[in-house]
Amino acid sequence: MPLFFTVMACHVSFAQTVKQPPAVSPGRTIPLDHTDSLVMMDAGVLPSVDLLAKLDSLSKVDSFLRFRTKVYPFPDVIAAVLRDFPFNLRHLTGELIMAEGEIENYASIVQLSEAERCLITCYHSRYDTTVSWQAKMPVSDAFEKADRLYHDLYRKLQQCTFTMSDGNIIYLKGVWEPAREDAAFTTSTLRLTTGDWRYKEVKVELELVYLMAEWGVNINIVTKKRDDEVGGGGVGDLMK
């Protein structure tokens, strides 16, 4: 028992002396690494604008601490991902799951209840340093069931919005592509209703795929530009 209390005392002492990050001048951001997870998640804070506004002021956390991903309502997750896209999703990137060559897959800190898993993929080639976000839905051996999910998710995506710092509400608009059982791959693409250059190449792809006698539905949020072309905006839009 004395050993137990000694260990606990050391742990509490360490937790109270975590080094604070350096102060950041207004209008500037500091590089974040993958230990800069959303430590407020366990407090039940949604991935809202208020949460994103606090990210750069969070304490550095030692690497042994592990933070759980959490499930949020569909529109909150999509809005959080789109808000953070100009920052290459660095605020929503969780634990490293797999690294292979110039591709790394991380857990998304925000998860959809409809999905089996949500992943963030980082590319580190010379010509492509972008990121993408994917929600993989449960597969089905019945086309009709997968088609209903495909249609339902498209309607949900059409209802997703988020607000920019100037007060403009951004919607997702696209063209519905109906699926056919004799087509192995169907994609409906939605784009953001904004002229903001940071979102020029961002698109939301909803796909229905047939593979190995099963139908799968995925949501992919991607950009074709490198991060040095997409990034560069201030934190203003995340803080509104």
Image (cartoon, rainbow, N blue to C red):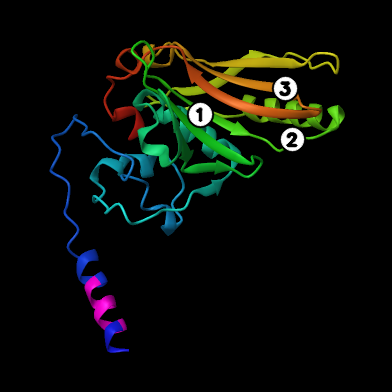
* Label 2 environment density (alpha carbons within 10 Å; few <14, some 14–19, many ≥20): some
Which image quarter holds the C terminus? top left
Q: Is residue 64 left or right of residue 114?
A: left
Residue pointed to by mark 1 = 133
Q: Is residue 28 above or below residue 180?
A: below
Q: Is residue 210 left or right of residue 203?
A: right
The image position of residue 184, as x and y in percent, is 77, 16
Mark 3 lies on a secondary structure that is: strand
Whole-number angstrom distance, CA of label 2 to CA of label 3: 9 Å
- Marking on residue 209: 3
Q: Is residue 197 above or below residue 47?
A: above
Eye-nearest disc, 1 or 3: 3
Work out whether residue 162 or residue 116 is closer to the camera in this orientation and state it.
Answer: 116
What residue sits 59% from the left and 16% below the top?
A: 190
Q: Earlier in the sequence, mark 2 or mark 1?
A: 1
What residue sits 83% from the left and 33% below the top?
A: 141
The image position of residue 82, as x and y in percent, is 46, 27
Magenta region: which residues? 4-10
Residue pointed to by mark 2 = 139
Amino acid carrying label 2: it is Val
The image position of residue 67, as x and y in percent, is 41, 53
Find out whether the residues at labels 1 and 3 contact each other: C-beta distance under 8 Å. Answer: no
Work out whether residue 210 or residue 92 is closer to the camera in this orientation and state it.
Answer: 210
Amino acid carrying label 1: it is Trp
Q: Earlier in the sequence, mark 1 or mark 3?
A: 1
* Label 1 environment density (alpha carbons within 10 Å; few <14, some 14–19, many ≥20): many
Q: Is residue 215 above or below residue 197?
A: below
